[in-house]
Image (cartoon, grey):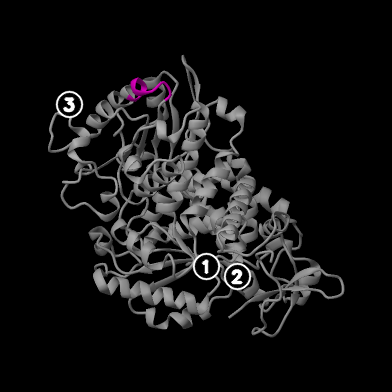
Amino acid sequence: MRTFSLKIDPLTQEEYLEVYLRGKQLLADPFLNKASAFSEEERLSLELEGLVRYALSDLDVQVERSYDSFLQKNTDLEKYIFLQGLLDRNEILFYKTLMLHLKEMLPIVYTPTVGQACMQLSRITRRYRGIYLNITNLRNIDTIFRSISQPEVYLIVVTDGERILGLGDLGSDGMGIPIGKVSLYVAAGGIHPACTLPITLDVGTNNEALLRDPLYLGHKVPRLEGDAYFDFVERFVLGVKRNFPNALLQWEDFAKHKAFDLMQRYGDRILSFNDDIQGTGAISLSAMMAGLSIKNEKFSQQRFAIVGLGQAGAGIAFNIMAILKEEGLSEEESARLIYAIDQPGLLMEDSPNLELQMKRFAHSRSDIADWELENSNKITLKDVVFNAKPTILIGVTAQAGLFNNEILEQMAVNTERPMIFALSNPTSKCECTPSEVYRATKGKGLMAAGSPFDPIVGEYGTMHSSQCNNMYIFPGIGLGALIAKAPRITYKMFLSASKVLSKMVTEEDKGKGILLPDLDEIRKVSFEVAKAVAICARDTGLGRYLEEDELDRIISKAQWNPQYYTYRPGFNTNQSLSGSFLGQ
């Protein structure tokens, strides 16, 4: 049942919300609750008299009060619980507070703290948020979707909880990830929160600890697999298409053996993408572009070692190959510059059980005929670093300490300014730390990590590490695709996003070895990424034909900023939305 509609007064042109809730029901609605900011007129007309305290506080005062409470929390998990409570009470206040303190709060609402929260979600849940679909309620999917209160849904972030960050199968406790991603879409991209919906597909869990845990709130059955699993997902996707035909669907934290299949099955059927594959590939490519601009070198002059060819590693490898082909190399020539390493070691054409995404990057024995190897049956990262002499080293393995001092020192021998990307989250899973790169490269390394790190200052000067955060990419991708009304998202759109993002790194920052823009510019970043995506969609025949100045106007209007609307009482809950939260 809809709880409000966006309206425009035909006389004054004032935008307001026509609200269908009253009294305590209104105060319990997190999007509509303004708490102490309800005006005297609203208190009277919406039956709030006596339910709120006397004083009126505007949004700025409420933010000050909330931030003071945030600072009084002693641990990151306590801060996470506080912010989730604020989100569940008052979404406008939550997003205003988050946006004003984004750098400080980003590690709390998402990585690394969200991983800790997911591991305890059944214990810290105060109020359910989003939609949980399971084996027993899937048959009622249309009823479930029709029961939500938003006037429209444009964005869905969905997980099945099987591969949460580097933590593995957390079942329906993985819901913290879609909730966190939605928060970033709103704060960074400007997607209106009333248009968003986090969803968890609770298809069971193979995590024995959760199955034995009496406090676990998910469905305690082994995970659906095979045809039964893909039938479940198919019914879910069809339900989305029936009920939310204009929505973008983002796949999040699915296991790799399912993620690639889902991306291929639905990439052309529904507006969707996989952030773990495509978003990670795009942000990593953009950071590499900035790094090579610092070095004044081309991609075709590099040699790439990628450790871990799951979703993130494959996404990065595919993007590197795409840019190498743009520089004129053939697919075969491009593949020879990419050394992909997984559990069997360097991926070879005769390696057993190669997965589909691995085969494209497998080397022949002739490629390594002159290498000096400790064991020809398993070619290690050390073998690759000393023989192939890569100039760019990328880790997406969740193996802390994998890039040891010997590896890092050899990277500094291979090239004057090695690029080291230790991208695993949370921080405890990072392949190496900036301080280790600093010592091994004498401060000359160009470093990107999955989590934020402070600059390293020492005898070799200052070395900065850039957080290779997908937040630079996915909010703009989503916003741009929705603005363009694209039927699908292509690799060219991601490539366009990578290019425009790399150009936003200032020359001053490049001089410091910084590979990505400042997070304080995230709204501007999302604007430029969205525009690049919309232009790419237009120019490839997949989006609306809009001139750049018109795109500027629409994207600016679509980027929502937290504010309280004026409320007027309404009575017809079946009224349709009279305005748009996407600025169209």
Q: Which mark is residue 28?
A: 2
- The relative height of residue 369 versus residue 364 in the rendered view (above or below) is above
Which quadrant does the C terminus fall into? bottom right
Q: Would you say 365 lies left or right of 218 here?
A: left
Q: Is residue 320 magenta?
A: no
Between disc 1 and disc 3, whose residue precedes? 3
Quadrant hosting residue 305: top left
- Secondary structure at numbered mark 1: loop
Point out residue 366 in the picture as x, y percentages from the top left corner. 19, 36
N-term mark: 1 or 2: 2
- Residue 156 in the image, given as x and y percentages of width and height: 50, 66
Question: Dot 1 surroundings within 10 Å: few (below 14), some, or many (20 or more)?
Answer: some
Q: Which residue is mark 1?
A: 487
The secondary structure type at the circle numbered 3 is loop
Which badge, 3 or 2, is on the more N-terminal residue? 2
Question: In the displayed structure, does residue 224 sit left or right of residue 266?
Answer: left
The residue carrying mark 3 is 372
Q: For mark 2, give the secondary structure.
A: helix
The CA span between labels 1 and 2 is 37 Å
Q: Quadrant of residue 27?
A: bottom right
The location of residue 568, given as percent across then percent down, is 76, 75
- The quadrant the N terminus occupies is bottom right
- In the image, 209 versus 450, the foreground residue is 450
- Residue kind at label 1, given as amino acid type: Pro
| Residue 251 in sight here | yes
Q: Are marks 1 and 2 in contact (CB under 8 Å)?
A: no
Q: Position of residue 173 (x, y in %)?
A: 37, 61
Magenta span covers which residues?
Answer: 411-417
Asked if the stretch drawn in magenta spans residue 412, the answer is yes
